[in-house]
Image: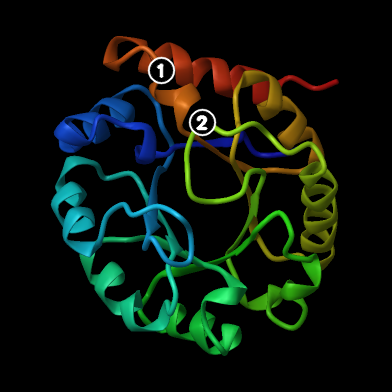
Amino acid sequence: MRSPVKIAPSILSADFARLGEEVRAIDEAGADWVHVDVMDGHFVPNLTIGPAVVRALRPHSAKPFDVHLMIAPVDPFLEAFAEAGADVITVHPEAGPHLHRTIQRIGSLGKRAGVSLNPATPMAALDYVLEEVDLVLVMSVNPGFGGQGFIDGQLRKVEAVAERVSRIGKPIEVEVDGGVDPATARRATDAGATVLVAGTAAFRGGPDAYRANIAALRGGAELRS
C-alpha cells in the first residue's frame, strides 16, 4: 500500500513581507514539508532568497525544509544552505560540472540529496546517480516563476522516474512541482508522485484558507481513478 502523499507548500507564493508568519501558518494548516525555491536570476529568470532567509525562517517550523536550488554554479552554496537549516537540498544536473560529486557533498553535510529535471531535461540525466539520491523532482513547469500552467507531457516523465525508482528498492521520493492544484495533484500521484509542491494553490485566499487548500490538495491527490 502506498504511503500518503506529502504536501509541500512553496513559499514563493507566500507574502514575503511576513514570511515567518506564513511558514508558521502553513505548518499549522497541515503542510508536511516547507518548499523553499532559491533562484539566482541567472540559472532561472527570477531572483528570490538566500541562506540568510532560510536561517531566519528555520525557527518558525520543525517541518522538513525542502530547499530547491535553482542556481549556478551550485556547489559553492551547498554548505551555507545546509548550515541555514535545509533538510533536503535539490540541485539541477546543469548547475555544475560534476553532479555525482555534488550529490556526495550534500550527503556529507548530513542532508538528503535531490536532483531536479527541467521539462526539457531527459531522464538519462539520472543515469549512474539515481541510487545515490533521496529525491527526484520533476518540474511540470519551466522554473522561474509561480502561477504557470501544468505541462501535461511531464506526467510521462513522472511515470518513468517512478518506475525506475521502484526497481531500485530504495525509498526515493518522486516530487512534482509546477501548476499543482487538486485536479493535477491526482494526475501526478496517479503517475507515481509521492511529494507535491504547490504554490498558488496552497497560499490562495490567505492564512484562513490554508488548511482547506492543503486538505483539497491532499484529497485530490489521494483519489484514485
Seen at 24% across and 41% down, the residue is 61
Seen at 33% across and 61% down, the residue is 86
Q: Give the number of the mark in front: 2 or 1.
A: 2
- Indicate left or right for 98 with 80 as reference: right
Applied colour scheme: rainbow
Instruction: Name the element at disc 2.
Output: loop
Residue 7 vs 206, above or below: the answer is below
- Indicate left or right for 1 with 12 as reference: right
Q: Which mark is residue 99?
A: none
Residue at numbered disc 2: 147
Q: Give the image location of residue 32, x and y in percent.
A: 43, 37
* N-term mark: 2 or 1: 2
* Amino acid bearing label 1: Arg
- Indicate left or right for 37 with 6 as reference: left
Tell me if I can see residue 222 in this picture: no
Picture quadrant where residue 81 is located: bottom left
In 3D space, how far apart are the residues under numbered discs 2 and 1 (Cα atoms)?
11 Å
* Image quarter (top left, top right, bottom left or bottom right) of the C terminus: top right
* Amino acid bearing label 2: Gly
Seen at 42% across and 39% down, the residue is 10
User: Around disc 1, counting alpha carbons within 10 Å, would you say few (fewer than 14), some (14 to 19), or many (20 or more)?
Assistant: some
Q: Which mark is residue 204?
A: 1
Residue 42 vs 22, above or below: the answer is below
* Image quarter (top left, top right, bottom left or bottom right) of the N terminus: top right
Seen at 17% across and 37% down, the residue is 20
Residue 25 vs 145, above or below: the answer is above
Q: Give the image location of residue 190, x and y in percent.
A: 79, 33
